[in-house]
């Protein structure tokens, strides 16, 4: 049962880690990034330089709570508002010096800076989801910025196309052609919340297995092949072991052989017949045979390309054996006496 290495020999570990990270980071749907200032519905922007920021773009309003400004005329109020506008205009001009055509901000963008971005032909997206902004910065190759005094020190994000798309009744902004090409968006849809939750859990499990496979690239044959190999070895060892230990070893081998049975039952096939065929195949030294659930027969897992993560398989065995050992160590179970029920003499 030697693990199989599915990656080429001498693969760069750093590249594998980058691929693992991008596979997680790319699985996002930025549903909050729906407001832009460039054009009507159905906007489209190509070859985009993106500045991702987390800064206040609402300083045209005085935000000091409890503050009071005394003026003797409305002209003074107009001067204060004009000073605030000039301050915001300078900030927008510093942002425009970065040579961008798309500005994404974690916080709100008020009407005046939004108007300035529109006049400069810059797409402005406001109030983006914070975790979504972090992931977007990573997949586009940019950094989240809060100050704009040194454009040469800011790392911009890049993508080939930004467009507005409709998925069902939701309007989303689609980023395609990002710097980390492994990134993608996974959108789950279902009739009920329970179906969506189950699909999300299944997807999360699959991504976790993928991450473990990238960290530990060795794999083993699936379809119950590994379990039958292990059960056969344990059974042979039990036959040569004297004493009560042989009984425990036979039980462990029997537990291993239940996994192919569960696989066949879940697929709706006759598990007794398929497991018997699989056991006979392994007795004939067909050590790479397992269950082919596409056709309801047994087959060669090497030819079918059905493999499982060695790291996950090992962890499953360790966790199951540790749980069984913990249960066997329990001598007695102490239960508290049930609470006596007091008769109710005053029914409603």
Image (cartoon, rainbow, N blue to C red):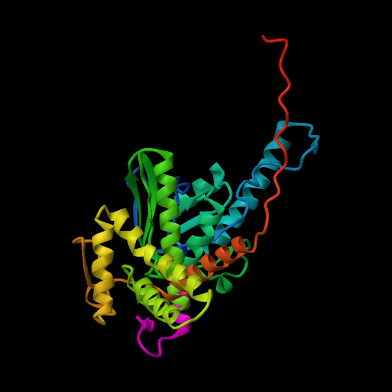
Is residue 247 among the parts visible in the rendering? yes
Residue at 51% across, 47% down: 114
Q: Which quarter of the rendered picture does the N terminus lie within?
A: bottom left
Is residue 3 a member of the stretch shown in magenta? yes
Residue at (24, 80) in percent of width and height: 284
The answer to whether residue 198 is above or below residue 221 is above
Residue at x 48%, y 61% (from the top left corner): 136
Front-most of residues 101 and 163 = 163
Indicate the quadrant where residue 240 lies. bottom left
Residue 211: in sight, yes or no?
A: no
Whether 305 is drawn above or below 112: the answer is below
For the point 41% across and 67% down, the residue is 254
Q: Left or right of 312: which side holds 225?
A: left
Q: Is residue 68 left or right of residue 331?
A: right
Range drawn in magenta: 1-20
Q: Is residue 140 magenta?
A: no
């Amino acid at each position: 049962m030697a693990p199989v290495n599915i990656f080429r020999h001498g693969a760069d570990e750093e590249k594998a880690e980058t691929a693992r990270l991008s596979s997680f980071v790319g699985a996002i749907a930025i549903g909050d990034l729906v407001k832009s200032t460039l054009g009507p519905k159905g906007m489209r922007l190509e070859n985009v330089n993106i500045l991702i920021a987390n800064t206040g773009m609402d300083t045209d309003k005085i935000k000091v709570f409890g503050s009071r400004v005394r003026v003797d005329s409305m002209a003074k109020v107009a001067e204060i508002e004009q000073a605030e506008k000039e301050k915001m205009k300078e900030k927008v001009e510093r942002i425009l010096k970065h040579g961008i055509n798309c500005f994404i901000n974690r916080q709100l963008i008020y009407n005046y800076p939004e108007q300035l971005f529109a006049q400069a032909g810059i797409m402005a997206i406001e109030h983006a989801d914070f975790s979504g902004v972090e992931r977007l910065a990573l997949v586009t190759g940019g950094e989240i910025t809060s100050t704009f005094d040194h454009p040469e020190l800011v790392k911009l994000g890049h993508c080939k196309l930004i467009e507005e798309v409709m998925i069902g009744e939701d309007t989303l902004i689609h980023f395609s052609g990002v710097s980390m090409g492994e990134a993608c968006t996974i959108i789950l849809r279902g009739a009920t919340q329970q179906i969506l939750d189950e699909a999300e859990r299944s997807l999360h499990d699959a991504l976790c297995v993928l991450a473990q496979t990238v960290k530990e690239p060795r794999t083993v044959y699936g379809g119950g092949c590994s379990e039958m190999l292990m059960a056969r070895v344990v059974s042979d060892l039990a036959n040569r072991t004297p004493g009560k230990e042989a009984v425990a070893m036979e039980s462990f081998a029997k537990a291993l052989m239940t996994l192919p049975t569960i696989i066949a039952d879940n697929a709706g096939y006759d598990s007794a017949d398929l497991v018997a065929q699989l056991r006979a195949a392994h007795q004939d030294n067909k050590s790479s045979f397992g269950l082919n659930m596409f056709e309801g027969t047994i087959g060669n897992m090497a030819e079918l390309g059905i493999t499982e993560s060695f790291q996950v398989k090992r962890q499953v065995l360790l966790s199951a054996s540790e749980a069984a050992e913990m249960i066997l160590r329990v001598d007695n179970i102490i239960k508290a006496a049930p609470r006596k029920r007091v008769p109710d003499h005053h029914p409603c």
